[in-house]
Image: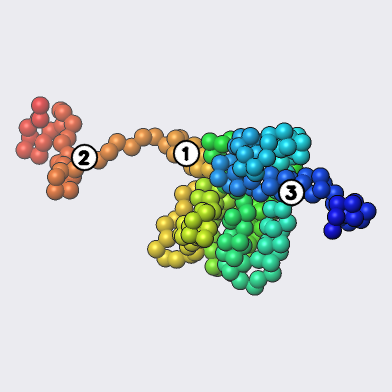
């Protein structure tokens, strides 16, 4: 089809429009990879180079970082909402949770960038905030359902799981992008209730109250012991008569 015939049809974009759409797609794809690898505050010029376009082209499509973050997050929101609905419909909460996390792990680079040297989330990225909110709701609902079904430990919290996932490795480009599955499997296994599991330390709110109550107690002097573990002989205070009538010095 010639350019003249294409221009007569409103459903066929003109060559310049097609180039603009192509550049936008390249920028979004490059930004998604860069955010996953380097965090949300990676250089925009580096994203442009990844996409094979100039910085001016990037700023023409996305005038500021928040606009680019929101564009990347919009598809992520759709993906995790669909995955969450599917997971919540599974009768077994454990199966739903594991399937959900394996599905969305690669789609949540922004979640894992929190706490990294790359910095916090950009302010004003509203779609990204919706991604986080939807993700937390799904994880919390599945975790509570699993605890009611006794397939997840009773002392695990959604904050525990979200923090562990955020600290985990990003999806690897090697080994078919499955390098993250082993640490994620170990993480999930730690949620299962089993007799050998150690009891978790108190959450920060409980820890503060425990520390205050401990601080109010008087200090207890350590009890001395001999090498064989027996307690040393207790000597009476000076001036107390002994059974034989003598007085110790």
In front: 55, or 189? 55
Position of 17 relative to 177 (above/below): above
Frontmost of labels 2 and 1 is 1
Query: Dot 2, crowdedness within 10 Å: few (<14), some or many (≥20)?
Result: few
Q: How is the image coloured?
A: rainbow
Q: Determine the secondary structure under disc 2.
A: loop
Query: Dot 1, crowdedness within 10 Å: few (<14), some or many (≥20)?
Result: few
User: Residue tagged by mark 3?
Assistant: 22
For the point 45% across and 66% down, the residue is: 194
Distance of mark 2 from mark 1, alpha carbons? Answer: 26 Å
Query: Dot 3, crowdedness within 10 Å: few (<14), some or many (≥20)?
Result: few
Q: Residue furthest bottom?
A: 91
Q: Mark 2 or mark 3, which has the lower sequence index?
A: 3
Counting the numbered discs, the total is 3
User: Residue tagged by mark 2?
Assistant: 224
Residue 6 located left or right of residue 210: right
Distance of mark 1 from mark 3, alpha carbons? Answer: 58 Å
- Residue 241 position within the rendered picture, expressed as x and y whole percent measured from the top left: 12, 33
User: Residue tagged by mark 1?
Assistant: 211
For the point 69% across and 44% down, the residue is: 27
For the point 17% across and 35% down, the residue is: 236
């Amino acid at each position: 089809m010639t350019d003249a015939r294409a221009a007569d049809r409103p459903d066929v974009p003109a060559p310049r429009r097609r180039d603009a759409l192509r550049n936008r797609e390249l920028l979004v794809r490059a930004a998604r990879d860069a955010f996953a690898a380097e965090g949300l505050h990676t250089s925009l010029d580096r994203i442009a180079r990844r996409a094979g376009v100039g910085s001016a082209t990037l700023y023409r499509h996305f005038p500021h970082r928040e606009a680019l973050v929101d564009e990347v997050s919009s598809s992520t929101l759709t993906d995790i909402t669909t995955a969450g609905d599917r997971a919540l419909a599974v009768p077994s909460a454990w199966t739903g949770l594991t399937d959900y996390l394996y599905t969305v792990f690669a789609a949540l680079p922004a979640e894992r960038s929190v706490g990294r040297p790359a910095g916090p989330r950009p302010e004003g990225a509203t779609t990204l905030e919706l991604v986080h909110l939807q993700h937390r709701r799904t994880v919390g609902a599945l975790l509570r359902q699993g605890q009611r079904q006794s397939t997840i430990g009773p002392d695990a919290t959604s904050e525990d799981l979200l923090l562990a996932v955020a600290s985990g490795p990003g999806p690897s480009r090697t080994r078919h992008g499955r390098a993250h599955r082993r640490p994620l499997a170990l993480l999930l296994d730690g949620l299962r209730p089993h007799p050998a599991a150690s009891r978790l330390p108190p959450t920060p709110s409980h820890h503060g109250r425990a520390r205050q109550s401990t601080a109010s107690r008087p200090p207890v002097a350590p009890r001395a012991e001999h090498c064989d573990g027996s307690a040393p002989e207790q000597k009476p205070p000076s001036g107390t008569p002994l059974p034989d009538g003598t007085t110790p010095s």
